[in-house]
C-alpha cells in the first residue's frame, strides 16, 4: 500500500495542443486525484514573434481554464501554476523547477508538455519510487524505454541511462545534480566515454561537447554523467508507459525522425513484477545496442537528411527575419 504520492512537475511553453493532450492523459490516471501538480510555463523570449506570443497565450489560457475546472470537478489533489517572469530556456526552467519541488516533497515525477502517459503511469512511478527510495544504487525511475524485443526482460529492468521522457527521482539523488561543463570535460576518461556511449554504439557524450561549444543548452546529459559517477542504474519498463508526441517539429530538440523511438501502444500493465537484483540487464543492453546500430544510416542518406535539416533551419531563420514564427 502506497503511503505517499509524489508531486508531478510539468514544464510547458507555447504548445497548447500538446499541453492539453499531456494534461488530459495524466488526469486519466486514478492516482491523479491524490497527486499535487505543478505546472511551469516559461516566459516568451524578448524577441518572440507574434505567432509565439499567441501560442504562448493560448497555452496559458488552457492551463488557467483547466485549473478553474479542477476546482469544480477535481482531477488532481491540487494544481499550482508558476508563470516565469523572464525567459529561462528549457534547461534552466527544468533544473529550477525540479529543485524547488523536490526539496519540498523529497521526490518528484517530471514531465514535459509532449509526453502522453498511460492510465497506469502514476501507479508505476509511485510504486517504484517507494520501492527503491533507500536503494542508493537506483538513480531514477524512467517511464520510457527503447522499443526493443521484450521477451525475456520481465516487466522492467535496470540499465545505465536515465531517460527523460517521463521520469522520477528523489531529493537524495537530485542533490548531486550540477550542470557543470568544465567538471564533465575534465573527469571522464575514454573508457568512461565508451560506457556513456553504450559501449561505443551511440553518441550521448556528443551532447556534452555540443553544450561545451554553445551549440545547444540541455540538462539531461549531466544527469546521466553524474549518475554514472555515482555507480548507479535506472529502472526502465520493458514497454514504455509514455509516448512522445513532439516529433512534429514543434519542440526544441525533437525532429520528425524521432518517431522511431515510440511504441505503437503504451504499457497498460500494472501491477508488475520488479527485478530481483539491481544489476544491468545484459539482455536489454544487447538489444539496445542492436537497436542503436540499426539507426546507423548509409552515408548518402545521412548526408541527404543533414542537408534537409540545414535547409529547414535556414527557412525558419528567413521566416523569423520576415516576421514569421520560429521554434523555441
Image (cartoon, rainbow, N blue to C red):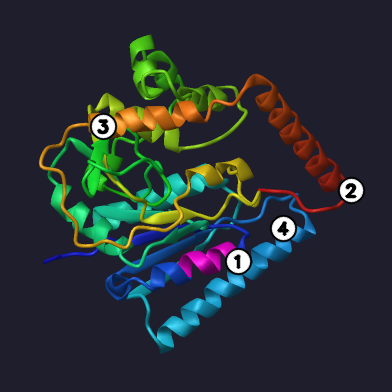
Residue 179 visible here? no
Tell me the residue at 34%/71% (across/down).
29
Q: Which mark is residue 70?
A: none
> Does the CB distance between marks 2 and 4 fall below 8 Å?
no
Region rendered in magenta: 17-23
Residue 1 visible from this viewpoint: yes
Looking at the image, which residue is at 21% across and 53% down? 129
Q: Which residue is mark 1?
A: 17
How far is the residue under mark 4 from the one under mark 1?
14 Å
- Secondary element under disc 3, as helix, strand or loop, is helix
The relative height of residue 316 versus residue 323 in the rendered view (above or below) is above
**Element carrying mark 2:** loop
Which mark, residue 52?
4
Q: Residue shown at 16%/49% (left/top)? A: 274
- Which residue corresponds to mark 2? 322
Total numbered labels placed on residues in the image: 4
Task: Answer whether labels 1 and 2 touch (C-beta < 8 Å).
Answer: no
Query: Is 11 or 304 nearer to us in this picture?
Result: 304
* Mark toward the start of the polypeptide (2 vs 3): 3
Question: Would you call the spot at circle 2 few (<14 residues within 10 Å), some (14-19), or many (20 or more)?
Answer: few
User: Can you identify the residue that label 3 sits on?
Assistant: 283
Give me the C-alpha separation between circle 2 and circle 3: 52 Å
Earlier in the chain: of badge 1 and badge 3, it is 1
* On screen, residue 186 above or below 220: above
Mark 1 Cα shell of 10 Å, populated few (<14), some (14-19), many (≥20): some
- For marks 4 and 1, the one nearer the N-term is 1
- Residue 307 in the image, given as x and y percentages of width and height: 75, 29
Amino acid at each position: 500500500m502506497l503511503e505517499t504520492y509524489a508531486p508531478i512537475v510539468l514544464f510547458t511553453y507555447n504548445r497548447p495542443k500538446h499541453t492539453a493532450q499531456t494534461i488530459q492523459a495524466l488526469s486519466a490516471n486514478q492516482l491523479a486525484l491524490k497527486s499535487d501538480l505543478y505546472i511551469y510555463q516559461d516566459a516568451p523570449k524578448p524577441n518572440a514573434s507574434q505567432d509565439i506570443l499567441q501560442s504562448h497565450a493560448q497555452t496559458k489560457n488552457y492551463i488557467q481554464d483547466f485549473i478553474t475546472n479542477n476546482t469544480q470537478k477535481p482531477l488532481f489533489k491540487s494544481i499550482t501554476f508558476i508563470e516565469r517572469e523572464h525567459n529561462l530556456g528549457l534547461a534552466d526552467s527544468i533544473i529550477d523547477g525540479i529543485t524547488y519541488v523536490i526539496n519540498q516533497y523529497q521526490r518528484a515525477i517530471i514531465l514535459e508538455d509532449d509526453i502522453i502517459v498511460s492510465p497506469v503511469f502514476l501507479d508505476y512511478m509511485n510504486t517504484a519510487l517507494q520501492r527503491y527510495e533507500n536503494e542508493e544504487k537506483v538513480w531514477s525511475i524512467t517511464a520510457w524505454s527503447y522499443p526493443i524485443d521484450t521477451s525475456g526482460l520481465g516487466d522492467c529492468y535496470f540499465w545505465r541511462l536515465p531517460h527523460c521522457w517521463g521520469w522520477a527521482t528523489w531529493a537524495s539523488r537530485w542533490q548531486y545534480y550540477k550542470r557543470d561543463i568544465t567538471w564533465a570535460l575534465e573527469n571522464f576518461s575514454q573508457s568512461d566515454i565508451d560506457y556513456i556511449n553504450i559501449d561505443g554504439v551511440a553518441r550521448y557524450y556528443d551532447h556534452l561537447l555540443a553544450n561545451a561549444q554553445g551549440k545547444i543548452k540541455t540538462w539531461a546529459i549531466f544527469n546521466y554523467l553524474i549518475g554514472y559517477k555515482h555507480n548507479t542504474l535506472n529502472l526502465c519498463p520493458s514497454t514504455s508507459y509514455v509516448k512522445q508526441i513532439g516529433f512534429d517539429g514543434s519542440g526544441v530538440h525533437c525532429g520528425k525522425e524521432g518517431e522511431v523511438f515510440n511504441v505503437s501502444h503504451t504499457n497498460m500493465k500494472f501491477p508488475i513484477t520488479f527485478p530481483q537484483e539491481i544489476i544491468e540487464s545484459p539482455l536489454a543492453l544487447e538489444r539496445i545496442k542492436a537497436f542503436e546500430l540499426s539507426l546507423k544510416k548509409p552515408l548518402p542518406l545521412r548526408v541527404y537528411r543533414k542537408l534537409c535539416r540545414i535547409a529547414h533551419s535556414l527557412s525558419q531563420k528567413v521566416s523569423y527575419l520576415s516576421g514569421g514564427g520560429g521554434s523555441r
